[in-house]
Image: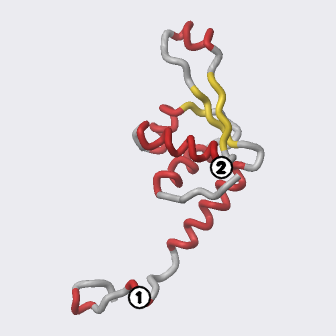
Amino acid sequence: MGSLRMTLQTQLVLRALLEDPAKQRYGLELCEVAGLPSGTIYPILARLEQVGWVDSTWEDPAVHEEAGRPRRRFYQFTKDGAEQARDALAHAYRSRKQPLPGWAARPVSDGGVS
């Protein structure tokens, strides 16, 4: 288990998975729910798997062959993954609510923030 950088895109993927934490979801389904392209979703899912928050399994070959589509890889939270995701999202939310530090603010006369 490790730490994860909480980008906005990562937060969107976690929120999509948290809509139903016990449900297995496949990548393109998560793309639709999170509103992100597959090129963004799959690297995030790989990182979530690396830190131990998510497990993945491949669909039974007979199912996708019968449906006439590519095989799906399903993602689901690990035993502690959903709780870790909730904690990380709460921390990310709290950190955004903090005021700008003094060194980050510029005087209004410079066109910056006060």
| Position of residue 11 in the picture relative to residue 56 (left or right) | left
Residue 114, given in percent of the width and then of the height, sits at: 34, 89
- Which residue is outermost to the right? 79
Residue drawn at x 69%, y 55% is: 84
- The quadrant holding residue 73 is top right
Vertical placement of residue 58 versus 3, above or below: above
Callout 1 amino acid: Trp
Label 1 to label 2: alpha-carbon separation:
33 Å
Callout 2 amino acid: Val
Residue 67: numbered disc:
none
- In the image, 103 versus 75, the foreground residue is 103
Q: Which residue is mark 2?
A: 51
Residue drawn at x 29%, y 92% is: 107
- In the image, 25 versus 7, the foreground residue is 7
- Which residue is outermost to the top? 66
Vertical placement of residue 85 versus 93, above or below: above
Instruction: Determine whether the residue tagged by mark 2 lies in a helix, strand or loop.
Output: loop
> Circle 1: is it few (<14), some (14-19), or many (20+) Cα within 10 Å?
few
Residue drawn at x 55%, y 8% is: 65
Q: How many marks?
A: 2
Q: Mark 1 or 2 closer to N-term?
A: 2
Residue 103: numbered disc:
1
- The quadrant holding residue 112 is bottom left
Residue drawn at x 47%, y 52% is: 9
